[in-house]
Image: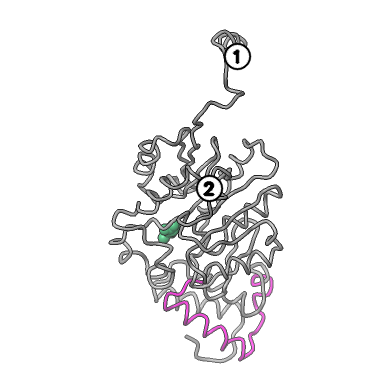
């Protein structure tokens, strides 16, 4: 990438950007800045305020190595071993999926439904927690929440645990090695206010067509949703009602085009109502919320027909 040995910030960024671009990297300038920031211990703003700062040969060498790794497709988050998500900067490695911006919306939905719960301590379960992005954000943003973060991968749980300790959230986030809800202790039954998950949802035959950053570097376990991409939704939708309190919520991230199918699975199960789909910032249907149906109407909802009519008049 680099021939001569004395470059300043501006010059080296230009070279790195065009090198990444030639290698088919999607946001070459942004990635060049993020990686240079890591070498110089600079924020992106500092890169611009110190635009003409010369680089030492050692810095150039370190930067050259990072840029060549990026050129081969490794995502910046795995190179830097960190990724910002909502209020947190999470440690990530190739044992966990890199948290996506659209998953931040899942957390918004959790906060929204949690407000509807009357309990003082809200109990949640995050299925397939990965880096812990969802579970830890909930615990960080909701001081009343207690989160059980489940994952089948010991390696992923190690990353999530480290993130919990970094943010001192380990008292309110408990990690359990578990294949979604399969094998979860019976003591959780009818105890959970909110179950949330960003399960693997890519149809198996589409994995090969994913961009190389994802296909060659992210854990298949966190991506492959079976032949039609819906395998894990079927399980979660079938298993969750036994663990949710009546009136509790199931919140699922979904892939593009999956809203209708997931809605149908929820409705066909007969165990949920108030099914609602939200779009992400790109206008793609991304989050499904469903309420665990009351088996018996809650006491507050019992109304005589007369009461009902007088309310309507007032309204
Ligand atoms: N959002 C990821 C992607 O677009 C997929 C994550 C998942 O399967 N849950 O590749």
Q: In this view, does 243 lie above or below 303?
A: below
Q: Does the magenta stretch include residue 91?
A: no
Q: In this view, does 51 lie above or below 2?
A: above
Neighbor class of circle 2 (other Cα within 10 Å; few <14, some 14-19, many 20+) is many
Q: Which of marks 2 and 1 is nearer the N terminus?
A: 2
Neighbor class of circle 1 (other Cα within 10 Å; few <14, some 14-19, many 20+) is few
Image point (57%, 73%), residue name: 81
Is 63 left, or right, of 209 in this rendering?
Answer: right
Label 2: element kind = strand
What span is colored magenta in the figure? Answer: 47-76
Residue under label 2: 195
Q: Nearer the viewer, mark 2 or mark 1?
A: 2
Image point (66%, 67%), residue name: 45
Q: Which mark is residue 39?
A: none
Q: Does the magenta stretch include residue 70?
A: yes
User: Which SS type dominates the magenta stretch?
Assistant: helix
Between residues 190 and 98, which one lies in front from this camera angle? 190
Between residues 287 and 152, which one lies in front from this camera angle? 152
Q: Position of residue 210 (x, y in %)?
A: 35, 64
Label 1: element kind = loop
Between residues 273 and 209, which one lies in front from this camera angle? 273
Q: Where is residue 301 in the image (x, y as percent from the top left)?
A: 58, 22
Tell me whether circle 2 and circle 1 mark residues in contact (CB < 8 Å): no
Of the 4 image quadrants, the one containing the C terminus is top right
Residue at the extreme front: 186
Tell me, what colour scheme is on the image?
Answer: one colour
Q: Residue 315 carries which label?
A: 1
Image point (42%, 78%), residue name: 72
Is 290 left, or right, of 262 in this rendering?
Answer: right
Between residues 189 and 314, which one lies in front from this camera angle? 189
- Give the total number of marks visible in the rendering: 2
């Amino acid at each position: 990438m680099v021939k001569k040995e004395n470059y300043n910030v501006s010059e080296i960024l230009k070279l790195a950007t065009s090198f990444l671009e030639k290698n088919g990297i999607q946001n070459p300038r942004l990635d060049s800045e993020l990686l240079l920031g890591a070498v110089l211990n600079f924020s992106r703003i500092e890169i611009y305020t110190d635009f003409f700062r010369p680089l030492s040969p050692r810095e150039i060498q370190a930067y050259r190595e990072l840029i060549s790794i990026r050129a081969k497709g490794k995502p910046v988050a795995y190179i830097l071993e960190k990724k910002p998500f909502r209020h947190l900067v999470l440690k990530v490695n190739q044992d966990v999926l890199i948290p996506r911006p659209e998953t931040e919306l899942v957390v918004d939905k959790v906060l929204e439904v949690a407000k509807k719960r009357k309990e003082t301590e809200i109990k949640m379960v995050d299925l397939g927690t990965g880096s812990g992005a969802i579970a830890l954000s909930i615990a960080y943003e909701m001081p009343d929440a207690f989160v059980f973060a489940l994952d089948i991968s010991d390696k992923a749980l190690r990353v999530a645990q480290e993130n919990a300790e970094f943010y001192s959230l380990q008292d309110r986030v408990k990690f359990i090695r578990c294949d979604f809800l399969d094998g979860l202790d019976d003591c959780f039954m009818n105890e959970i206010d909110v179950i949330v998950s960003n399960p693997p949802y890519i149809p198996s035959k589409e994995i090969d067509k994913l961009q190389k950053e994802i296909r060659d570097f992210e854990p298949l376990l966190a991506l492959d949703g079976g032949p039609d991409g819906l395998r894990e939704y079927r399980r979660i939708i079938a298993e969750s009602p036994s663990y949710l309190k009546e009136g509790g919520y199931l919140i699922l991230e979904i892939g593009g085009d999956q809203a209708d199918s997931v809605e149908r699975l929820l409705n066909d199960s007969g165990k949920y109502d108030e099914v609602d789909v939200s779009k992400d910032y790109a206008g793609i249907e991304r989050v499904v919320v469903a309420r665990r149906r009351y088996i018996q109407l809650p006491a507050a909802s019992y109304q005589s027909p007369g009461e009902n009519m007088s309310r309507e008049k007032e309204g």
